[in-house]
Amino acid sequence: MADDRDKNGDQIYDDLKKVTEAAESKQLRHRVDEYVAMIIALSAVFILWFLQFVGLY
Amino acid sequence: MAQDIIYDQAAGETPKVRNPSSWSALPNFRKSWPGLLAMATIALLCGLPGLDFFLTLDTLLHYIDAVLPPIYGKGFFTDLLHFNYVITCLVVGIVIRNVIGVPHSWESGLTFSGVFMNVGIIMLGSQYLLRDLIKLGTISIIIMVVMVFGGALIFTFMGRLFKMGDSMTALLAAGFSMCGVSACIAISPMVRAKSEEVAYAIAVSVTFGLFCLFVLPFVGHWLAMSDDAFGLLSAAGVPNSNQVIATGFNYSFEAGRVAGFTNIGRLVLIPAGVLFIYFMTLGKELRSSSVSFWQVLKEKFPVFIFGFAIVWTLNCLKVWPVPASEAMGRVMEWFFALSFVGLGLQTKLADLKKAGSMGLVIGYVAGSLRIVLCLVLLYIAIKMGFLT
């Protein structure tokens, strides 16, 4: 009975650890995605402004 | 997290432990290019706005509408089904994923659809002026605050009514009241959710968002909603950010513009919303003492909003003339189109089964209640003269 309870506790702990790790890695990716998006968007805005500035369109 | 061990020769081969850079979270380009190329090709073949490319699905649908006899004087695809680049990109993506199948080599590149969505949102700043903030700022903030916190209350009530369990209630409340998948993942460790509960909550919020994306524009047309009102409805009622933008642009360009702008308000509210749901759903004995406001703010605040603020400020200062602003708007739509294709290609209809009937019923009932609450708020705002 006590063994079953320990086993169940271990399983819950492992699952919680798995969820925390998955959340951490996804949040890190999410954060990096935000930085990449900022770089791409600000570059695109600058390029479009520059092309207009030099009279390309 | 794995750590890299590097050897510094000058220090006599002494091993040093270095944490890997955050950038290592991105998949490398060699793995990603097939998916990126697939997204770009499919978007191009669906028909990108402003590009007069002859061989597109959009051209084909317009041709069919011109050839077929009109129904009630309207074209079947373009007028009755409101097919546009948003729906075309999404439907083609969903069909490829669920009927033909997506090669494994595409998967890595498809994860960049979130990046393209963020790029589009940042570039959306070039479509706003100070008068837009004055016109929509107050009402959108009021509606967003009521919807985020009111939505969380609706889900907490439903969760207690159906005895769903604290963690599941918190996941659904976060997923529906804020930005769907990201909010579910953000709150999952705080409420000690099980992995199957996270998958379940994500599946319910994604399928509800998909349902909204196709159904809400018809509701909007039926109620003869203005672009501003519909944009607010999509931002407040649809769970996921990318689905918010897609629903808005599915209605009209102007509604998409308003939806994107208003959604910024919801994104800013994520840290406060996460904490609110945490304290509302978890009993005192289950709360962790390590959860603090500043920690949650630091971890969950969406930093790309600063990019939007930069572009918007430059546009307000008239740094670039109108033609450049129009070109930015066009490129913004292309990035959105790429992300809609990616969204479609990542939508697995089998997730409907994963969500299960009970989860779907609770999610859809509570999600629909939120939309009704939003419609009531919009009606009051129109009656009070804040909106048209």
Image: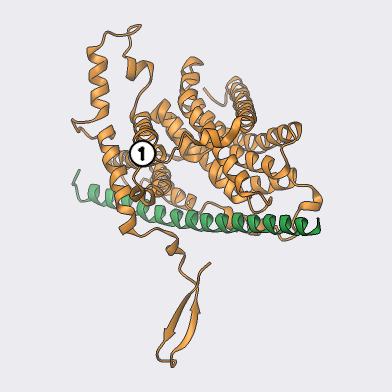
Chain colours: A green, B orange
The residue under label 1 is which amino acid type? Gly
Residue drawn 43% across and 34% down? B246
**A39 in relation to B46, above or below:** below
Q: Find numbered disc 1 in the image and state the secondary structure of the residue it sits on.
A: loop
Residue B237, position in %: x, y? 56, 31
In this rendering, the count of numbered labels is 1
Chain label for disc 1: B
Mark 1, residue position? B101
Occupied quadrant, residue A1: bottom right
Residue drawn 42% across and 41% down? B346
Q: Name the foreground residue: B55 vs B120.
A: B55
Q: Going by the image, does A34 lie left or right of B139? A: left
Q: Going by the image, does B110 lie left or right of A47? A: right
Residue B3, position in %: x, y? 50, 72
- Residue ranking furthest to the top: B72
Q: Name the foreground residue: B80 vs B266.
A: B80
Q: Residues within 10 Å of mark 1 (few under 14, many from 20)?
A: few
**B319 in relation to B169, above or below:** below
Residue drawn 54% across and 38% down? B203
Residue B313, position in %: x, y? 43, 48
Residue drawn 25% across and 11% down? B68
Q: Going by the image, does B244 lie left or right of B253? A: right
Question: Can residue B111 be seen?
Answer: yes
Q: Name the foreground residue: B327 vs B359.
A: B359
Question: Can residue B269 be seen?
Answer: no
**B62 in relation to B1, above or below:** above
